[in-house]
Image: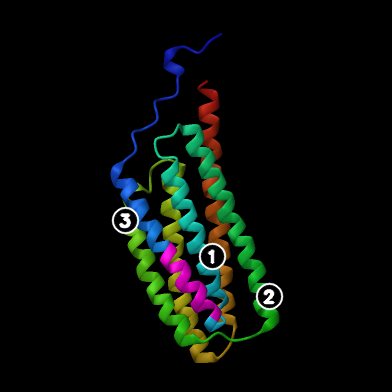
Amino acid sequence: MACNHCCDEPAPPKPDSKFRTALWIALFINLAMFLIELIGGAYAHSSALWADSLDFFGDAVNYGISLAVLGASLYWRATVALVKGLTMALFGVVVIGKTVFAYVQSIPPEAITMGAIGVLALVANVSSALILYSFRDGDANMSSVWLCSRNDAIGNVAVILAAVGVFGTGSIWPDIGVAVIMASLGLSSGYQVVRQALAERVIRHEST
């Protein structure tokens, strides 16, 4: 039996111009910080900065994807969010691998460079988080971009604290500890986004 009109999926929402603008700003911020942390992390021998640079790159890609699906159906928005959630979880796995590699090398990072770039990254991520804050309770696509910026801001605070720890102790362990925290954030947030995206895909399926 064909589904009657009341079961039809609601029309895709008209793209929010404010959300689109917020995404573009966040996209450019994350691309710039990716390059800064990639170079700075290599110079300072910091696993946390290197990992954070990959996170910035991943976020920039996610924001670009989010821009591409604005106004699409719930099914496709949820599908893109599902891919982003899996990417966030994969990032967590990659960071764990890099942390193990750093432990084997046992080269303490350069604390001053690490801390300075950490402060700059924190400013960038807090700015992105504030810009995206009002969209945090939207669909899986909107909430995922908010989670990206929130996680980055939390991670940057940890990077700064790790730089202080490395400066005070000369040990690699604060840097490794931050990498583990960032990996945990990636895994937990990826799970959260994937769960919401799967639920939205089910809703779309049941409405047809």
Q: Give the magenta part as a residue range.
A: 31-42
Mark number, residue 101: 2
Residue 11 against residue 158 in the figure, above or below: above
Q: Earlier in the sequence, mark 2 or mark 1?
A: 1
Residue 11 placement, left or right of 46: left
Residue 107 in the image, given as x and y percentages of width and height: 63, 86
Residue 22 against residue 17 in the figure, above or below: below
Disc 2 to disc 1, C-alpha distance: 16 Å
Three-letter amino acid code of the residue under disc 3: Ile
Q: CB of mark 2 within 8 Å of CB of mark 1? A: no
Residue 184 placement, left or right of 17: right
Residue 133 in the image, given as x and y percentages of width and height: 34, 53
Task: Name the residue that disc number 1 marks.
Answer: 54
Callout 3 crowding tier (Cα within 10 Å): few <14, some 14–19, many ≥20: some
Three-letter amino acid code of the residue under disc 2: Phe
Three-letter amino acid code of the residue under disc 1: Leu
Disc 2 to disc 3, C-alpha distance: 35 Å
Residue closest to the eye, 122 or 25: 25
Q: Residue furthest left?
A: 18
> Could one spot residue 13 in this view of the protein?
yes
Q: Earlier in the sequence, mark 2 or mark 3?
A: 2
